[in-house]
Image (spheres, helix red, strand yellow):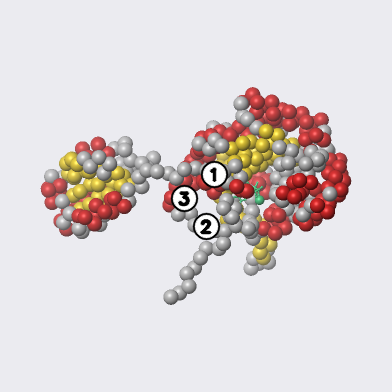
Amino acid sequence: MAKKLQSIRGIHDGLPAEVAKWRNIEDVARKVFACHGVSEVRLPILEPTSLFVRSVGEETDIVSKEMYAFEDQGGDHICLRPEGTAGAVRAYLQAGLTRAGAQRWFYMGPMFRRERPQKGRLRQFQQIGVEWFGVTGPVADVELLSMAQCFLNALGIEETRLEINSLGCIECRPAYHQMLVAYLQTCREQLCATCNERIEKNPMRVLDCKNKACQEQLTDAPEMVGHCCQACDTHFTGLKTGLDALGVSYMVNPRIVRGLDYYNRTAFEFVTDQLGAQGTVLAGGRYDGLVESLGGTATNAIGFAAGMERLEMLLPDLKGHQLDVVVASLGDDSLAYSLKVADALRQQGLAVVHAGGGAAKRQFKIADREKSRFVVVIGEDEVAKDGLMLKDLATGKQDFYVLDDAIQVLSGVGMIE
Ligand code: ATP
Ligand code: MG
């Protein structure tokens, strides 16, 4: 026998039950985002590798070891996008929108990172991302976070907590970096190898180390929130005041640094305790310098991305019927008419399959297995009377209707919107 082909490790198939949940999440996102004036964009999956090196940062895990990057047949260095923000900024610049006023975008789609696969950590995963360009004051941060909270609420996900932090800016971060490096050097021996590499290159990432022994060393580490400049402090206060005004609860977590280099000022995560180490379901922050560093005029921006697979794990399986009607036809002479009936019911927006004729028992079994709500039975009598037998599988009740009446009865009960 031929060897079975398997998908790549950490890359999963979306089968119907799962896709139904994803679509539900997407529909909720579309509704909530539309109420906040956010428009959908669809951006490329393949991008130049240099885009991520320049934006996400060379020292990050994503760029240093997780990208699916290759040279194509023409010698171009391209990669499967590991995240959406860099591509959104590229598209924004390429379309010349820097003078077009604020842009509020969202996107949904696959991202690729060659991580160690675990529950809630895949190599191909889907993000719902939001990017707002040309938004400056803390009001934008407040509205973005309240929109994210609305989205989670609308999904019925209630057990997340919002953690926020300020990462400072180019004015105040250098002095803080120095202080942090000095501190980290005092406990260098107790920190893990990765942290040691990061002390000089990217000291704030050390704060984010998941290693327990490292975390123990960090209890007295200086925190950015305590060393922000006046402007960053004012911004952070504005954010907190706005969240308070809207009744969005949060806690300040000075350890949040985010894994990508481009963030400044506001950083945040919505976290749950229900997914183990993969507890961050939605995360983001401000990236005021990124547009400029990719060649545009200085443009403030803020965004987030939510992991579809993690959201999905927090939601109950969808119950309910897959089908409204299974049409069973008894006897060869009723086949043609029964096919027409099936079509007429579909015209009403009902989800209908034809059981294919043949033995009655087999056809009823199909209705059962497919969890249909109704069975329509058509035999010689029904053909002669231009009607059908309609059986409600929940109640077992069964009645004859002429076709037009049956359509009346079934109209409005279809599951398809
Ligand atoms: P984590 O700390 O969990 O690795 P991250 O900081 O790498 O997350 P981002 O790059 O900001 O996360 O991505 C935003 C969201 O996308 C995450 O909060 C998570 O929900 C989801 N996500 C990130 N990486 C993966 C992955 N490999 N598999 C599934 N979902 C992911
Ligand atoms: Mg990660």
If you read the primary sequence from the N terminus, does the residue marked by circle 3 or circle 2 appear first? 2
Residue drawn 43% across the image and 50% down it: 17
In the picture, measured across the screen, residue 257 lies left or right of residue 160, that is right
Decide: few, some or many residues near mark 3? Use Cα within 10 Å; few <14, some 14-19, many ≥20: some
Report x, y in % for residue 146.
61, 32
> Helix, strand, or loop for circle 3?
helix
> Helix, strand, or loop for circle 2?
loop
The quadrant in which residue 300 appears is top right
Q: Which residue is mark 3?
A: 18
Give the position of the N terminus as an image quadrant: bottom left
Q: Which residue is mark 2?
A: 12
**What is the three-letter code of the residue carrying label 1?**
Leu
**What is the three-letter code of the residue carrying label 3?**
Glu
Report x, y in % for residue 298.
75, 40
In the picture, measured across the screen, residue 368 lies left or right of residue 135, that is left
Give the position of the C terminus as an image quadrant: top left
If you read the primary sequence from the N terminus, does the residue marked by circle 1 or circle 3 appear first? 3
Report x, y in % for residue 376.
23, 47
User: Does residue 45 show up?
Assistant: no
User: Does residue 378 show up?
Assistant: yes
Relative to residue 146, is residue 309 depicted above or below? below
Q: Which residue is mark 1?
A: 311
In the image, is the residue at mark 1 within 8 Å of ligand 1 by its beta carbon? yes
Relative to residue 234, is residue 190 depicted above or below? below
The quadrant in which residue 67 appears is bottom right
In the picture, measured across the screen, residue 293 lies left or right of residue 80, that is right
If you read the primary sequence from the N terminus, does the residue marked by circle 2 or circle 1 appear first? 2
